[in-house]
Image (cartoon, grey):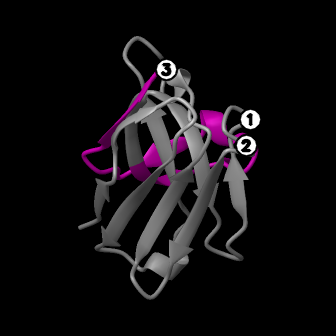
Amino acid sequence: EVQLVESGGGLVQAGGSLRLSCAASGFTFDERSIGWFRQAPGKEREGVACISSSDGTPYYADSVKGRFTISRDKAKNAVYLQMDSLKTEDTALYYCALPVGTWLVDVSSADFESWGQGTQVTVSS
């Protein structure tokens, strides 16, 4: 059974930073691409970043490009999302998840399966 457990969310002022972590289990970590999506109240789900299983190439939504960095640690079966220069519009529940389908085309509209419980990120002005 796939399990994804997120942590690291919190309250931060605009311009600040947070680092999200995701502990993965229940599948062969090296064989699956993995990423993050977010869900804000009243807004559609948005894919934020994914990292390819084949070569570790990161892919980002335009809204976070240059501010967020996704990385993975194969030894720990973990994936991270470093979020810098946070904006109030980054406020959302962030989920670690497994992308499926043609996610390489546009991360922001990617489909995902098997996500965790989410971690709340709140950015104040």
Q: Which residue is mark 3?
A: 44
Residue range of the region highlighted in magenta in the rendering = 96-125
Q: Secondary structure at mark 1?
A: loop
Q: Which residue is mark 1?
A: 62
Instruction: Identify the image quadrant of residue 24.
Output: bottom left
Whether residue 54 is in magenta: the answer is no
Is the Cβ of the residue at disc 3 closer than 8 Å to that at disc 1?
no
Q: CA distance from mark 1 to mark 2?
A: 5 Å
Q: Looking at this view, is 53 or 74 the one in front?
A: 74
Q: Nearer the viewer, mark 3 or mark 1?
A: 1
Amino acid carrying mark 1 in the image: Asp
Q: Is residue 54 above or below residue 58?
A: below
Q: Residue at x 30, y 73 (%)?
A: 25
Residue 116 place in picture, x, y as percent? 29, 51
Q: Is residue 9 above or below residue 73?
A: above
For disc 1, the neighbor class at 10 Å (few under 14, some 14 to 19, many from 20) is few
Q: Secondary structure at mark 3?
A: loop
Q: Which residue is mark 2?
A: 65
Q: How many marks?
A: 3
Q: CA distance from mark 2 to mark 3?
A: 19 Å
For disc 2, the neighbor class at 10 Å (few under 14, some 14 to 19, many from 20) is few
Q: Residue at x 66, y 42 (%)?
A: 107
